């Protein structure tokens, strides 16, 4: 009986962690739609505007898949997203881009780091949940678009590189802080991360991997990390 209770406790904790992960992803996709749709209006070309509008539509499709999965689990999507509204809004408020290029760098570098973190967690979930998370984290085409646009802008005006590099470093700090707070504030999710990482040292190694991938993105943009 004791073992059964222990198994039930583990199952309940894992389910809570899955709900948290799907909830934060759902709100992330919803805000991504909002930001891409808004950024589309500032695109310097009609082609850029159309590309961002299409990406926004894809993000909304991802949101719908996550909301559907939460509903299938008997969870209200609004309730699952609610704990993450304030921290994610705070992150976006503190990293509001002032130019078109800063917006592209934020989506590629900042959002990319968050997605790397969620992919790490997805690897510890059941196959069905893992596959859904990886599906909604798939690239919408924004990565190649951002790299192309930023590199072209720097080639035209090399003085942009320094300012955009500083902006990207700020995003790294804010995004890492967001990921740490999102995990620490949700007990089941935090416990899952620590347990599956092995210990707190393992969590540190996880964040080192995230920082390494950030450096790769900076190189892709033609910026110093």
Image (tube, rainbow, N blue to C red):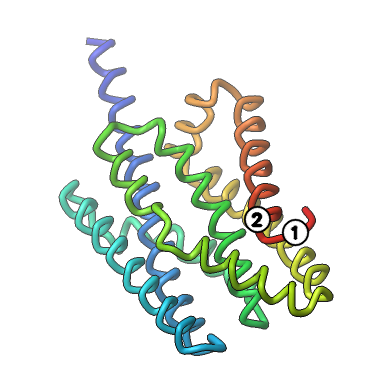
Residue at 61% of width from left, 26% of height from top? 202
From the image, tell me which residue sits under label 1. 169
Compared across the picture, whether 114 is left or right of 95 comes to left
Residue 98 picture quarter: bottom right
Percent position (x, y) of residue 52? 44, 76
Relative to the observer, which residue lies in front, 73 or 63? 63
Residue at 42% of width from left, 76% of height from top? 51
Percent position (x, y) of residue 170? 74, 62
Residue count near mark 1 (Cα–Cα under 10 Å), binned few <14, some 14–19, many ≥20? some
For numbered disc 1, what is the local secondary structure? helix
For numbered disc 2, what is the local secondary structure? helix
Percent position (x, y) of residue 113? 58, 51
Residue at 45% of width from left, 38% of height from top? 121
Q: Quadrant of the N terminus?
A: top left
Compared across the picture, whether 76 is left or right of 214 comes to left
Q: Is residue 197 above or below residue 40?
A: above
Residue count near mark 2 (Cα–Cα under 10 Å), binned few <14, some 14–19, many ≥20? some
Q: Which badge, 2 or 1, comes first in the chain's sequence? A: 1
Residue at 39% of width from left, 53% of height from top? 138
From the image, tell me which residue sits under label 2. 220
Percent position (x, y) of residue 196? 48, 25
Q: Is residue 67 above or below residue 95?
A: above
Measured Cα–Cα span from mark 2 to mark 1: 15 Å
Compared across the picture, whether 222 is left or right of 82 comes to right
Relative to the observer, which residue lies in front, 128 or 22? 128
The label nearer to you, 2 versus 1, is 2
Q: Is residue 21 above or below residue 150?
A: above
């Amino acid at each position: 009986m004791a073992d059964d209770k222990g198994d039930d406790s583990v199952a309940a904790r894992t389910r809570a962690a899955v709900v948290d992960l799907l909830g934060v992803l759902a709100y992330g996709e919803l805000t991504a739609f909002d930001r891409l749709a808004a950024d589309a209006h500032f695109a310097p070309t009609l082609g850029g505007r159309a590309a961002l509008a299409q990406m926004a539509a894809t993000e909304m499709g991802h949101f719908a898949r996550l909301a559907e999965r939460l509903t299938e689990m008997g969870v209200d999507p609004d309730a699952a997203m609610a704990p993450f509204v304030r921290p994610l809004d705070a992150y976006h408020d503190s990293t509001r881009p002032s130019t078109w290029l800063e917006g592209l760098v934020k989506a590629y570098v900042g959002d990319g780091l968050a997605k790397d973190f969620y992919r790490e967690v997805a690897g510890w979930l059941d196959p069905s949940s893992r596959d859904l998370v990886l599906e909604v984290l798939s690239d919408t085409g924004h990565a190649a678009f951002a790299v192309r646009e930023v590199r072209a802008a720097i080639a035209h005006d090399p003085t942009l590189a320094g300012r955009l590099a500083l902006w990207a470093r700020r995003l790294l700090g804010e995004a890492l802080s967001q990921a740490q707070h999102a995990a620490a504030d949700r007990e089941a999710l935090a416990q899952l991360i620590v347990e599956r990482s092995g210990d707190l040292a393992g969590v540190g190694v996880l964040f080192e991997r995230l920082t390494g991938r950030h450096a790769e993105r900076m190189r892709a943009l033609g910026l110093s990390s």
